[in-house]
Image: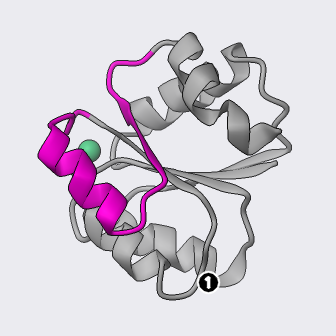
Amino acid sequence: MRILIVDDSSVMRKIVTRGLRQAGFAIDEILEAGDGQQGLEVLSNQTVDLILSDWNMPNMDGLTFVREARKTIQTPIVMVTTEGGEGKVNEAIASGANGHIKKPFTPDTLKDTLGKYFA
Ligand SMILES: [Mg+2]
């Protein structure tokens, strides 16, 4: 499994990485991007199996990132964000996101929400 984590906070990227490992997922490689634009750049020359994306980021936010990524790839994208309102989540799903994890999260939450992508 190769995973792309898109988040403007390097601390949050570390927390997500640690959470994935604590959840016990077998991960071959984790790629990181600091905003949606950087995320698209990574995806233009790398193939990943799962994308975890923040919502609020400079340059290109997570919702725009999902919409742009969906023009070319079908890789599962799960939003990891403080934007937990139902309307927001529905907007993300309608734009092509596959799921949603609310910050702060526990390894168990990651396990429950992301387990199907590691099957
Ligand atoms: Mg952010």
Residue 104 visible (yes or no): yes
Mark 1 — residue? 44
Q: Nearer the viewer, residue 91 or 49?
A: 91
Residue drawn where x is 49% and y is 54% of the image:
98
Q: Residue at x 36, y 70 (%)?
A: 65
User: What is the quadrant of the C terminus in the image?
Assistant: top right
Q: Where are the magenta residues, as a range?
A: 82-105
Determine whether, in the image, residue 43 is placed left or right of residue 103. Answer: right
In the rendered structure, the answer to whether residue 108 lies left or right of residue 70 reads right
Indicate whether 27 appears above or below 68: above
Q: What's the colour scheme?
A: one colour
Residue 51's image quarter?
A: bottom right
x and y percent of residue 69 in the render? 48, 77
The relative height of residue 37 versus residue 61 in the rendered view (above or below) is below
Q: Is residue 97 magenta?
A: yes
Where is residue 42? Give x, y as percent: 59, 72
Q: Is residue 60 magenta-colored?
A: no
Q: From what the image shows, is residue 102 above or below residue 85? A: above
- What residue is shown at x 45% (from left), y 70% (from top)? 38
Q: Quadrant of ligand 1?
A: top left
Assign a secondary structure to mark 1: helix
Is the residue marked 1 within 8 Å of ligand 1, measured from its CB?
Answer: no
In the image, residue 86 lies at what x, y percent? Answer: 17, 40
Amino acid type, label 1:
Ser
**Which sits in the foreground, 38 or 24?**
24
In the image, residue 43 lies at what x, y percent?
Answer: 61, 75
Give neighbour class at mark 1: few <14, some 14-19, many 20+ (Cα, 10 Å): few
Asked if one can make out residue 57 in the rendered structure from this viewpoint, the answer is no
